[in-house]
Image (cartoon, rainbow, N blue to C red):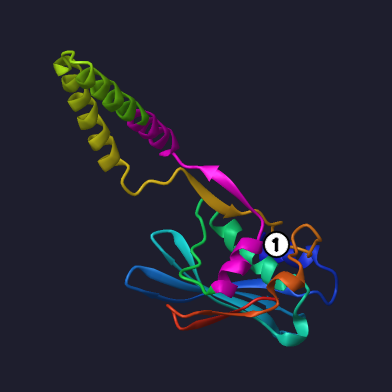
């Protein structure tokens, strides 16, 4: 949603979203999403970076007097809307941080590699069956040389496909939040579920959610 349409959508006195780029360095772009009151006061902000098109959350803060209004949810919805085909990276979180991440509604979207990963799983299952059949032939004293040759060929196919899909994932977990605008009950997360500070110790940042 553009700044103009955001302004038109909210009633008088409601905060509006503002996005800006803080810096570029080493192929990384550092950005900020802010919720700003009509008088220009920043009531909440979300710092994040983008590297290889993937957004990485750095810090979320909401003014104590503005918490429990769904502001953090609006900023996260805006972040996901800016990267609709990328899963947001939360980094390594503490127990509280993981609880916050799990509290947000999300949807699973299959990746282009999902079909290949399913095929790899089927081939590995076939390998297991062939190994059992060969063992049965061996125990019964029957010739298993032909079955072993077929097993070796299948093993080569499985190894090649596994190498091709080494870093592949079957799906992406995208936040399923209402696009930025007025907070709604469906888009807002219960304050009891995320009214706690979260320390992302790997980045030396503090994440506060309201």
Quadrant containing the N terminus in the rendered view: bottom right
Label 1 residue SS:
loop
Relative to 19, say whether 52 is above or below. Answer: above
Q: Single out the residue that lies furthest toward the front.
A: 140
Q: Position of residue 58 (x, y in %)?
A: 50, 75
Q: Position of residue 32 (x, y in %)?
A: 55, 75
Circle 1 residue: 180
Q: Position of residue 93 (x, y in %)?
A: 50, 72
Q: Position of residue 146 (x, y in %)?
A: 16, 15
Magenta-drawn stretch contains 94: no
Question: Quick check: 3 left or right of 87?
Answer: right
Which span of residues is magenta-colored? 95-124
Q: For residue 68, what is the image quadrant?
A: bottom right
Q: Single out the residue that lies furthest toward the right.
A: 12
Q: Nearer the viewer, residue 168 or 141?
A: 141
> Do we see residue 20 in this rendering?
no
Question: Quick check: 166 left or right of 36?
Answer: left
Magenta-drawn stretch contains 107: yes
């Amino acid at each position: 949603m553009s700044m103009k349409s955001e302004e038109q959508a909210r009633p008088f006195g409601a905060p509006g979203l503002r996005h800006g780029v803080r810096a570029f360095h080493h192929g990384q772009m550092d950005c900020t999403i802010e919720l700003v009151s009509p008088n220009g006061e920043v009531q909440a902000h979300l710092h994040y970076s983008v590297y290889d098109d993937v957004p990485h959350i750095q810090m979320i803060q909401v003014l104590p007097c503005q918490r429990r209004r769904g502001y953090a949810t609006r900023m996260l919805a805006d972040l996901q809307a800016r990267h609709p085909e990328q899963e947001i990276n939360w980094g390594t979180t503490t127990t509280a941080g993981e609880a916050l991440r799990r509290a947000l509604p999300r949807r699973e979207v299959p990746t282009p590699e999902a079909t290949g990963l399913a095929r790899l799983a089927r081939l590995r299952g076939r390998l297991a069956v062939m190994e059992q059949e060969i063992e049965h032939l061996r125990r019964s004293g029957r010739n298993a040389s032909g079955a072993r040759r077929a097993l070796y060929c299948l093993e080569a196919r499985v190894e090649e496909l596994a190498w091709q899909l080494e870093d592949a994932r079957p799906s992406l977990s995208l936040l399923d939040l209402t696009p930025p605008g007025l907070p709604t009950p469906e888009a807002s997360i219960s304050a009891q579920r995320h009214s706690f500070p979260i320390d992302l110790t790997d980045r030396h940042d503090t994440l506060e959610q309201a």
